[in-house]
Image: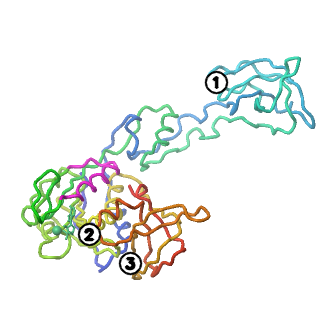
């Protein structure tokens, strides 16, 4: 398991910025070191353990980019069209045959190897065949046109995929193009998730009048799964310090990360703080972020713990800023800074300076093709509909105090966050 020293998240200041939190996590969390080989079919989303260098150039041999006629560059017509005798035919997958002689052309197809001596291909759409069966090509084509030289995509030995990359479908394609059947990745993280709160029951259980079905646990488990984690669902723990401390101790040794939701505020019935203090060590981070509230970071028997707030929207937003970078660091993945895209605000908004805020918005195509963000009409951190019925978050930086309609703001799609 990932071992962390007890003071690894300690922080003295009163209010922590999102950037400070991410920097502390990235600097102090060390990656799991177990590596496994997975087949290409299982590689998507996994974190590459070492660099992959090109074992062959891509394309591996010089070939035609089009269906047409290959000729020698020295033969290209100057000023007016020119007729060539057709002396051969090379299909994709076939060998290139003999070297091409001056004044000759070879019928060639996309992906077929270039005959020796030929370096230019006329597209079949640009030529005609004359009565003598010769191919007549126009003047004006540049030497080298319509040819893909060996290695033009990737040179032999190039570090094409770097350690720490979360593999995407196109990365898997590149590994396949190199002829690899397996890639070495860090093992999946094991993350324990539980909810806290006497008011919660699991879907399927009997719900008393003053109870809610637990929703956060399922949201967080799904977000973790998207980040490539194996999730242990540990259910709901009651608002009771002893049960919480026991639950935490039980899972610490066998997981890389413990994630809880609810009970991290400083009310009398918020027991995450005190139970982590009794089972391990804890710091409470008050992050300068809205929606959000205190987030607990702790270490129990060497295993990091993150306690997220209970309100669903606060839980979602703090997951993105605290859990996501922690999971990436533990998995050995390169941090992927969030990259807000410019969109036009279709709303007015006032906010406090010094705090980062996230506004839930719907996107639509506005005038002139620019995307326009419409704010969800209500702001409560408990409104699940505000996450369900929107496309993403507009990020308003610490320095911003107001947004006027028409202003350009940064948009983060939900898909980009996981
Ligand atoms: P807490 O952070 O425990 O003070 O909870 C804040 C609010 O979030 C309360 O209204 C809780 O009922 C609600 N809440 C806490 N945990 C969950 C959960 N797992 N699913 C849905 N709502 C929750
Ligand atoms: Mg609670």
Number of numbered discs visible in the structure rendering: 3
Q: In the rendered view, tell whether residue 254 sits above or below residue 354.
A: above
CA separation in Å, label 1 and label 2: 59 Å
SS class, disc 1: loop
In the image shown, does 105 or 127 lie closer to the viewer? 127
Left or right? Give the position of 82 relative to 243. Answer: right
The C terminus sits in image quarter = bottom left
- How packed mark 3 is, by other alpha carbons closer than 10 Å (few <14, some 14-19, many 20 or more), is many
Q: Is residue 231 magenta?
A: yes
Left or right? Give the position of 340 relative to 267. Answer: right
Q: Position of residue 397 (x, y in %)?
A: 44, 74
Q: Which residue is mark 2?
A: 295
| Ligand 2 image-quadrant field | bottom left
Q: In the rendered view, tell whether residue 21 sits above or below residue 139.
A: below
Q: Residue at x 39, y 52 (%)?
A: 333
Q: Position of residue 339 (x, y in %)?
A: 48, 62
In the image shown, does 8 or 214 lie closer to the viewer? 214
Q: Residue at x 11, y 58 (%)?
A: 207
Q: Which residue is mark 1?
A: 92
Q: Is residue 309 magenta?
A: no
CA separation in Å, label 3 and label 2: 15 Å
- How packed mark 1 is, by other alpha carbons closer than 10 Å (few <14, some 14-19, many 20 or more), is some
Colouring scheme, one of rainbow, by chain, secondary structure, one colour: rainbow
């Amino acid at each position: 398991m990932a071992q962390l020293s007890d003071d690894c998240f300690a922080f003295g200041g009163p209010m922590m910025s999102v950037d400070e939190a991410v920097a502390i996590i990235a600097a102090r969390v060390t990656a799991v070191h177990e590596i496994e080989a997975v087949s290409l079919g299982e590689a998507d989303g996994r974190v590459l353990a070492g660099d992959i260098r090109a074992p062959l150039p891509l394309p591996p041999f010089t070939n035609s980019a089009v269906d047409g006629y290959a000729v020698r560059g020295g033969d290209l017509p100057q000023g007016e069209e020119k007729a060539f005798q057709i002396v051969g035919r090379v299909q994709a997958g076939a060998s290139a045959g003999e070297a091409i002689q001056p004044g000759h052309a070879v019928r060639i197809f996309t992906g077929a190897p270039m005959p020796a001596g030929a370096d230019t291909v006329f597209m079949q759409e640009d030529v005609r065949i004359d009565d003598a069966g010769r191919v007549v090509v126009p003047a004006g084509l540049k030497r080298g046109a319509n040819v893909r030289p060996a290695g033009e995509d990737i040179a032999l030995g190039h570090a094409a995929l770097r350690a720490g990359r979360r593999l995407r479908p196109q990365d898997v394609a590149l590994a396949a193009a190199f002829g690899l059947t397996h890639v070495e990745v860090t093992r999946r993280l094991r993350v324990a998730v539980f909810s806290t709160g006497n008011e919660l029951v699991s879907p399927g259980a009997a719900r008393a009048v003053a109870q809610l079905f637990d929703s956060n646990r399922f949201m967080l488990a799904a977000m973790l799964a998207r980040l490539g984690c194996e999730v242990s669902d540990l259910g709901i723990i009651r608002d009771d310090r002893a049960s919480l401390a026991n639950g935490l101790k039980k899972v610490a040794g066998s997981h890389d990360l413990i994630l809880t939701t609810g009970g991290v505020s400083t009310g009398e019935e918020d027991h995450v703080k005190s139970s982590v203090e009794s089972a391990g060590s804890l710091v409470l981070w008050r992050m300068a972020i809205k929606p959000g509230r205190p987030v607990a970071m702790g270490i129990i028997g060497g295993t990091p713990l993150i306690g997220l707030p209970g309100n669903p929207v606060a839980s979602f937003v703090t997951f993105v800023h605290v859990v996501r970078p922690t999971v990436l660091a533990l998995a050995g993945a390169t941090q992927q800074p969030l990259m807000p895209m410019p969109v036009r605000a279709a709303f007015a908004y006032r906010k406090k300076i010094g705090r980062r805020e996230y506004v839930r918005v719907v996107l639509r195509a506005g005038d002139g093709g620019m995307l326009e963000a419409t704010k969800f009409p209500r702001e409560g951190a408990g409104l699940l509909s505000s996450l369900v019925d929107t496309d993403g978050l507009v990020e308003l930086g610490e320095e911003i105090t107001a947004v006027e309609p028409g202003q350009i703001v940064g948009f983060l799609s939900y898909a980009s966050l996981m």
